[in-house]
Image (tube, helix red, strand yellow):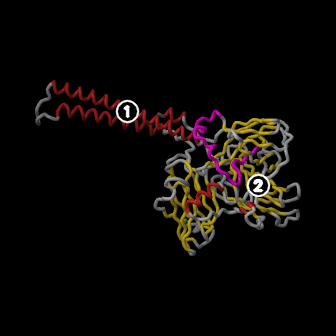
Amino acid sequence: MLAVAVLLLAVPANAHVGSPNVFYEGDAGPYHLFVTVNVPAVIPGVADVQIRAGSDDVRQVSTAVTRLAGAGSQYAPVADVAQRSPIDPHLFTSSLWLMEYGSMRVLINVAGAHGQAQMSVPVPSAARRMLPMPPALGGLLLTLAIALAIGAISIVGAAARESRLAPGAPVTPELKRRGWRAMAIMSVVAAAIFYLAFVWWNSDARSYAAITALFKPPRLSLTLVDRNRLALRPSPTDGVWLKFNVMDGIVPDHGHLMHLFLVRTPALDRIWHLHPARQPDGSFADALPSLEPGRYTVFADIVDQSGFPWTLIGSIDLPQISGTPLSGDDSGGQAPTLISSSDSTVDVLDDGTRVVWHRDSTALRANVPMILRFEVQDQNGKPATGLEPYMGMAAHAEIMSSDLQVFAHIHPSGSVPMAALMMASANSGAPASMAGMNMSDTNLNPTPAISPELSMPYGFPKPGHYRIFLQFKRAGKIETAHFDTVVN
């Protein structure tokens, strides 16, 4: 069993490759909250939930978990009261069991000076690894099991040999033989129990490993067609994922079925944010812009019909492409080659626009929820004007580690896909309220001004060197700024 467990050990991740935790900032009625859900590595497992209130008005917070959509999504269990931190009165924490795989939601009930309110935070629940049994624990359990079996065999033998004897009567040879026969039969029974237990254990381990493999980032098959057209589909080698036909039921997120990111490696000096169109055969394709040759790592974000986000990954070597001009929501950006010592807080764009990352004076640390704060300034260092919604949000950011083991596509609301949030809000009956969300670019409402101060909740999942690409829209043009940092 130990050998099987070790061989099946895996550390996969679902959407937001290598960055499984959920970060969300929004409003529960009149209360502004910053929510972090630390998703457990194994399912069933305990998720740690942190809720930070934006004011002193919140008196009590309680949490519960249910399905995001479908059967049972309307019936939440009794909520657990979150504990208020004795050090920081704005911080509340709770622990929730995630018992199922797939799209879940954490229901947050808030009571305060302005009455009752509720918020729903979508959470993708997926096993990311299989934990091996520690050898010492395995040895102890096996020893105890053998001792129990020996005890059971002895008890059965004694019962067959002496249970009908009068007190003080001698044990005859026939009774001894009967006792030995009973012990032999019980030994066979105990061996059968051991065998069936091992069969069940291994079968359960294989099933768990198959589910874990399902939630690994699916592989992409990429092909360059007609010199400047990229065709992509799930790799035929990813049979576990293909079996569930996820691509047949994906839904638009920020107005697109797929968000495709091409990052030139290892320099991380070019990024393209494109939106391929679905083809009649179910694959996706997009006409590439003009780009430099090199090896590109590709991340494709989609959301399935249950609200679960996925990131498909792949890579492709591309020649010099003479492509089509960018249009619509497609965008691109460039930066210097990433080097281990690079660290930056200001990026000056080609037109003189300055983008400043307002960092705290303390060093960044892994697994610490934070707010990434940026400011867009004009050529004179004044707050910029003319910012517009970009795909319904004030800004988008792509965060990646230098080894590309971490990739996250976030917004001012955090890491929650808009499509999943809409499902959660529809089921809870509360309107969606994501920080930085602005759907005015759907032409349903006049376009209000976007603040030049852009903030995004996130937590770097592990130490390392990171590059951040920040994308926003100003005066009809999509801009891309970059920042580098080291996380301890």
Residue shown at the point (54%, 38%) measured from the top left = 210
Stretch in magenta: 236-263
Label 1 sits on residue: 194
459 lies left or right of 138: right
Amino acid type at mark 1: Phe
Pick whichever, 288 or 369, lies toward us.
Answer: 288
**Residue 198, image x, y percentages:** 42, 33
**Residue 70, image x, y percentages:** 53, 53
Secondary structure of the residue carrying tag 2 is strand
Residue lying furthest front: 280
Pick whichever, 480 or 69, lies toward us.
Answer: 69
Vertical position of residue 204 compared to residue 72: above or below: above
How many neighbours does mark 1 have within 10 angstroms: few (below 14), some (14-19), or many (20 or more)? some
Amino acid type at mark 2: Leu
Residue shown at the point (78%, 53%) measured from the top left = 329
> Which circle marks residue 470 in the picture?
2
**Residue 246 sits in which quadrant?**
top right
Q: Nearer the viewer, mark 2 or mark 1?
A: 2
Residue shown at the point (48%, 39%) measured from the top left = 133
65 lies left or right of 220: left
Residue shown at the point (71%, 41%) measured from the top left = 279
Tell me how far mark 2 sits from mark 1, CA to CA.
58 Å
Pick whichever, 229 or 205, lies toward us.
Answer: 229
> Which circle marks residue 104 in the picture?
none
